[in-house]
Amino acid sequence: MLGWMLPGSADATTAVSTKPVQVGPTPVGGSRFTLVAGPCTIETREQLLTVARRVRLDGASALRGGVFKMRTDPRSFQGLGPAALEFVDEVRRETGLPFIVEVTAPEQIDVLAGRVDALQVGSRNMHNYYLLKELGRTRVPILLKRGLAAQLREWLLAAEYILAGGNEAIILCERGIRTFEPETRNTLDLAGAVWARHHSPFPVLVDPSHATGRPELIAPMCLAAAAAGLDGVMVEVHPEPEAALADGFQALTPDGFTALATALAPVLAAVGRS
C-alpha cells in the first residue's frame, strides 16, 4: 500500500490527510468545493454547449458528459462514441473548464486520455480489475465510482488497483447503493462517503442524481454532502430532461442548477469552504 492502510489492518489509521487532485485547472479537494455538472450523455453539440455555458455562469468547477455509455438495456442509447469528442474539444476551449468522461473498456483509454481531463470509472466497472490496472498505468486523474453493491472496503481496494500501477490521482465518488427501498433509484450512503473521506487520502464526491433518481432530492443531498465536509458533488443537467436520450428523469434543468448553486453558497460559507 502506498502511504496509507485500510481500516481493519494491523497498521490502520483513522485520520488520513486528503491530497487534492488536479483536474485540468481545477483542484479537487482542499478548501474549494467542486461542483461537477453536465448531461448524462452527450447528444448534440447544441445540447452540450447550452448546458456548459449555463453551468459555468453558475459556478461549475468541471463538466461531465458521456461519450461511451454503460446501459442496463442493450436497446438503450449507448452514446455517440468518439464523434462526441469534437464537441468536448469545443466546450473545453470555450469555457476553460475541465471535462470528465467515463471510460468503459481498456481500448478507450488512449482515445480519451489526450482529449479529456479525467476519466471516470462507473459503478458497473468498479470490479473490472483489468480496466483498473490499465488506468493505473496512465497519469490521467481517475474518478472512481462506488459499485452499487460494493462494501466500503471493496471500494478502497479497487482504488488500490489503480494506485498499484503508479497513478495516485484518484477521486472517489459515492453514487448510491442498491437497497430494498423502491422510492429512490438507489440509496445515498452519506455516512459511507464520510467514512471513505476519513479513511483514505482521496477526495470524495457525491453523485445525488444517480443516488436518488429524483430531481427534487438532488439539492437536499448536495447540501448534506457540503455540510458533511465532503469535497464536491456531481450532478446531471439537461436543457430538456423530458426529451433526454438517457436518464432524463434524474436531471436538473439549467434553472434547477442555478437554484442549487444559490442554495449551496451559505452552507459552504458556514463550513469554511468556497
Image: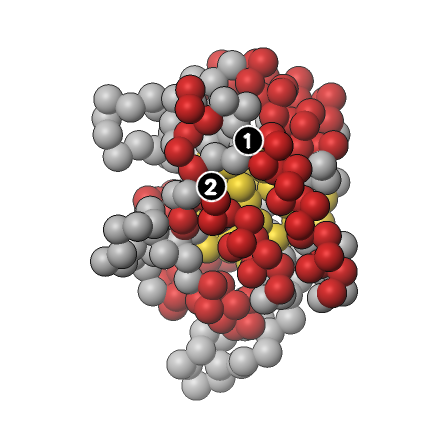
Q: Is residue 261 left or right of residue 127?
A: right
- The answer to whether mark 2 and mark 1 are in CB contact below 8 A is yes
**Residue 133, horizontal then vertical, whole percent:** 42, 48
Q: Quadrant of residue 223?
A: bottom right
Decide if residue 205 is in sight here: no
Q: Answer few, some or many: residues within 10 Å of disc 1's Cα (few below 14, many 20 plus, some between 14 and 19).
A: some
Query: Can you say which quadrant of the picture contains the C terminus?
Result: bottom right
**Residue 95, horizontal then vertical, whole percent:** 73, 27
| Residue drawn 60% across the image and 30% down it | 254
| Residue position marked by numbered label 2 in the rendering | 215
Q: Answer few, some or many: residues within 10 Å of disc 2's Cα (few below 14, many 20 plus, some between 14 and 19).
A: many
What's under tag 2, amino acid-wise? Pro
| Residue drawn 33% across the image and 47% down it | 185
What secondary structure is found at the residue carrying circle 1?
Answer: loop
Residue 268 versus residue 152: which sits nearer the camera? 268
Badge 2 or badge 1: first in the primary sequence:
2
Q: Is residue 22 left or right of residue 236?
A: right
**CA gap, disc 2 and disc 1:** 9 Å
* Residue 155, numbered circle: none
What secondary structure is found at the residue carrying circle 2?
Answer: helix
Count of residue discs: 2
Residue 171 versus residue 77: which sits nearer the camera? 77
**Location of residue 22 with respect to 112 vertically, above or below:** below
**Residue 87, horizontal then vertical, whole percent:** 59, 17
* Residue 253, numbered circle: 1
- Colouring scheme applied when the structure was drawn: secondary structure
| Residue drawn 50% across the image and 47% down it | 218
**Location of residue 171 with respect to 135 vertically, above or below:** below
Q: Quadrant of residue 160?
A: bottom left
